[in-house]
Image (tube, rainbow, N blue to C red):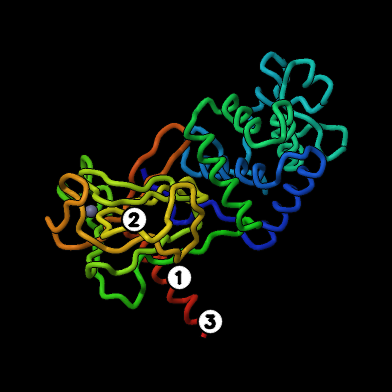
Amino acid sequence: MSFSLRDAHAKGPDEYQERMKLYKKVETVTLIPWYYLAAVDQYERTIRQVRKDLPKAESVIGIYFTPEKWAGPTNPNPEEENPAIIQFFNGMGVDGDGDGKASLKSDEDVLYTFANYLLSYGVDDDNIKIGLWNYYHRDKTVGIIAGKAKIYRHFGRIDLDTHVFPLPLRSNHSYRSTWGDARGWGGRRIHEGTDIFAGYGVPVRATNYGIVEMKGWNKFGGWRVGIRDINNTYHYFAHLSGFAKDLKVGQIVQPGTLIGGVGSSGYGPPGTSGKFPPHLHYGMYKDNGYTEWSFDPTPHLRLWKQQERQALKSKK
Ligand SMILES: [Zn+2]
């Protein structure tokens, strides 16, 4: 499966402002924290980008309701916009913008409808998670949304789209596209990543805004770290020499946060090292709400390197 290099970003800074305004407005009315609304919205926008059974998000809010869910499963008119009739047929749609209609075409109605759903459980973390579970019926989805909420809350903003290359640009390193090769170090069935060769101990950095989802030893991957970003992409760093001091699961990171060093750990019991030349195995996995699959990180690594170089230049 392929998809564009571009993640689920806003079309411009104005769109971020518009989104944030809606989150805050609906938070004021429902007391559902804005960062949960932002997290659900971003989750849905992102899965719509990679799912063929869902229409792409066209407007500012990315949350998707089927007309049946909105108007009520037994409602003979799936285009129904009368809030009273929708309620009669147990539809979810409610009027958020106060124009007397519950419209799927109104971003405010759509966002308010999701907040209104969560509100029936409560406004605290635990009850919101129960509401999310009852909506998505998938632990992983609830975990991903809760992680995004934590990231947005931590930074207090939603424009978190900058990236860096995993190794310092000035370090001596080399890589080529090795994704999909039959053999490799740390792969599973096929080689699910790009190997970046560099000296032992060269710093390894988070490439995205994200949350540390996994840290530990694996027979093949050695010492490794997994970071989930705000686009449902899981970034996997393997064969590390060790971890950055105090790095822990649940920690929020940003592009450039030190996570460990390049190493050659793996292929044996914990601590095994030196069975192959030191390199960083960089893997990327996309979640679409049902399943997760590996894709080639190489074009992304190239793009991030370019972007980081550009950003450094413009600072001078
Ligand atoms: Zn590898």
Ligand 1 under 8 Å from disc 2 Cβ: no
In this figure, which residue is indicated by the disc labeled 2? 297
Residue 90 x %, y %: 73, 17
At label 2, which amino acid type do we have?
A: Pro
Residue 139 x %, y %: 49, 30
The residue lying at 77 percent from left, 21 percent from top is 86
Measure how far apart labels 1 and 2 are at the Cα level: 15 Å
At label 3, which amino acid type do we have?
A: Lys
Cβ–Cβ under 8 Å for marks 1 and 2: no
Residue 244 x %, y %: 38, 61
Count numbered badges in the picture.
3
The residue lying at 45 percent from left, 48 percent from top is 228
Graded by Cα atoms within 10 Å as few (under 14), some (14 to 19) or many (20 or more), the crowding at tag 2 reads: many
Query: Which badge, 1 or 2, comes first in the chain's sequence?
Result: 2
Residue 104 seen anywhere in this rendered image of the structure: no
For residue 315, the mark is: 3
At label 1, which amino acid type do we have?
A: Gln
